[in-house]
Every structure is written in C-alpha cells, then in structure tokens.
Image (tube, grey):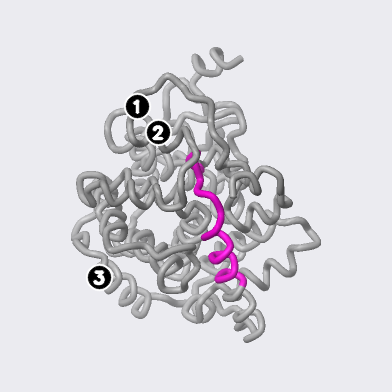
Amino acid sequence: MIIFARFFAPPPELENFLGYEWDSASPRTPRAEPDTARNRLEKSPVKRFDWYDEIHRLDAEADCRRITEILTTHEFPWDIEQALSLALYRTYAVPSIGRLLAETREFTERTQRRSDDTVIILTEIMRHGFEPGRGRDALRRMNQMHRSYDISNDDYLYVLSTFVVMPVRWINDLGYGWRRLTEHEITASTNYYRMLGKHMGIKGIPETYAEFYELFDSYEIEHFGYSEGGRAVSDATLDLMVGYNPRWQQPVFRKFTMALLDDRLITAFRYDRPSRFWRTAAHLAMRLRARIVRFMPPRVEPYRAEKNPKVKSYPNGYDPARIGTFPKGCPVPHDMVTVEIPETGSRLPAPGQELAPQERTARS
C-alpha cells in the first residue's frame, strides 16, 4: 500500500476531499527525540490500526487531550475538520449568537481571517494544553475576546456541546468516518471539551456524552430560528467554504455543501431545500470516501493548522497571543501596532504584527 501511495499521486482536489497528503505515510528522517511510543509512531510507517491501539492504551480521563489530538491530527483529520466547521456553523442559527457575530462585522467582512483565528487558537490549545506556553496564551486570547461581549452561559454551553456532538454525528451517526469512534474515544473527547469549558469559565457543564447530546438537541429545538444577522454570517461562511475550490467547480460544490446541511439548519436560515438528488449524491459520496480512506495508509505526521491550505492569514507564522480581534477594553500587547475599526471600535493587529518584534528580527 505504501509503494502504491508513492507512485500514484492524485490531483490536489482529490487529496483535499480524501483528507490526505498522499505521501504522508512515507518514513521520516529520525530526529534526536526521546524514544516514546508517540515519537516511534510518528517517525516510522505504521499499520492501519496502530493509532487505534495507541489510543486504547491511554486513559480516557488522564490522557483525554492526547487521545483527542490523535483523533484530530492522525485518525480523522479531514472528518473532524468538517465536523467542527459544521459545529461552529450551526451556532449561527441561534439568533442571539448570529446577531452578535454579525454586529462585530468580523465574520462577514473578514471571514477568512476569523476562520483562521478560530482554527489556530483551538489547534494551539489542543496541541500544547493548558499549562504555561502557547496553549495557555491561545486560551487567554480566546477568553479575552469572548469576555468582551455579553454572551450567556447557556449559549456558551450550546457552542461547547456542538464540539462534543458533531464529530460523533459525522463519523458514527452519518457513517462518514473510515471506522467508527469507540466509547473510549467518545468519552475521552467529551472529557477534553469538558476541561476546555472549565478553562473558559463555563458553568453547569454536562458530565457525559449523552448529557451533552440532550443539551445540544433540546437547545436547537428551543432556540433555532431566523435572524438577519445569522443569515448574513451563514452566507459569508458558505461563500468562503465554496471559494476554496476552483471557480468552475464552485456551483457544484455549493449544491453539494447545501445538501450536507440538515433540515433544521435549512429551515432556520430560510434556504431552499436541497433536492433529493443532491441529498443522495452528497451522502453516497461521503460514504464512498470513507470506504476508500479505510484502505489507505495511516497518517504518520500529524495534520496541523500550518499544513492546512485553507489557513492563509499568517504565512510567516504567528504568536497566539497576538492574533484575533481586540474589542474595546480588551488588553493589547504593549509592543503591538493596531488598526481601529471605526464601525465597532475594535482593534486589529496591523500587518506584520502577528509576531513579537524580537521574533520578527530572529526570522529575518
């Protein structure tokens, strides 16, 4: 299978759809690192279920971050990326959330940048954890932005529930993953997001996946509805998602993307209901992709934000403490030059300010 992978290089569009860099199973040059199980797996070719075995040697509570990281960067990188994108997208259908995001103008006028910031911040936290360093810097940056707005604890809980539920729905319930998530993996992922929620100061966090699912489902039934702001943010996000594809493919990808939205979302945003043909075609395509990926070699190197071609805003690198927006009252690093947005009073890092001066000097 590895030999086949080296000699057959698919077009980039197929690689993106399958969620693979085709040569990612190639052996890497050994580096001088501790001989841990993690490093052994990331240095040499592995069998299809080696990451699965590694996950199930770990503890679902004590090692929840590491398990979630393996799932996100090795086992299901493309699937979880799609699921979490849809998780955030669903929140726009809650009028209080959709209106707030529209009022900031960030998700309608700087959609690419805000999308990148979200991916980067969540990636840094998952990769580095909650201890001092890049992970805690990213967490602090996220909390600074959120606490600048009047967001209810109920809305926070709902957003957190989408991160717990949507990967399981995508991979297990819809059958779009190359294998099913196990109870051990679902428990670990739930524990990780519970930990993240606690560091965000969210109160009343559910303890189990079943409780998260109940919160997720009941909140959508009670609160989903149309708002002009939510529709505007939804339109901007769909334009961004479709725009990643070549122009001649975009009409097809728009229909395909809309067909992946469930009726609850279609109704809330007042979109035309997708035809049965597109619903069936999208579902079968996702199932076919899952079957193909099952027989592909496992991902050796972790798939992170810096490898994601959709993340475009920081080609020269970034400091997680210096990205995102700085609403009124939000502390700004003393050595950062910012630009004010007159309509909202928020400040944005000026071009080139995503790295601290000493780091910019070191890289020049």
Residue at image position (62%, 42%) is 23
Is residue 149 visible in this depiction of the protein? yes
Q: Which residue corresponds to the image point at 74% horizontal and 68% vertical from the top-left?
A: 251
Residue ID for mark 1: 35
Above or below, comparing residue 174 to residue 18 in the picture: below
Secondary structure under the numbered disc 2 in the rendered image: helix
Check the image and report above or below for 80 versus 319.
Answer: below
Where's residue 159, x and y in %?
36, 61
Q: Is residue 292 magenta?
A: yes
Quadrant location of the C terminus?
top right
Question: How many neighbours does mark 1 have within 10 angstroms: few (below 14), some (14-19), or many (20 or more)?
Answer: few
In the image, 25 versus 90, the foreground residue is 25
Foreground residue, 328 or 15? Answer: 15
Q: Which residue is mark 3?
A: 210
Left or right, 57 with respect to 312, comes to left
Q: Nearer the viewer, mark 1 or mark 3?
A: 1
Image location of residue 192, percent across then percent down: 28, 50
Q: Earlier in the sequence, mark 1 or mark 3?
A: 1
Give whichever of 72, 207 is nearer the camera: 72
Q: What's the magenta region? A: 285-303
Mark 2 to mark 1 CA distance (whole Å): 7 Å
Q: Give the residue pinned by disc 2.
A: 40
Q: Nearer the viewer, residue 59 or 250?
A: 59
Q: Say if the magenta span includes residue 28.
A: no
- Label 2–label 1 contact, CB within 8 A: yes
- Residues under labels 2 and 3: Cα distance? 35 Å
The type of residue carrying mark 1 is Asp
Residue 73 image offset from top left, x and y in percent: 45, 46
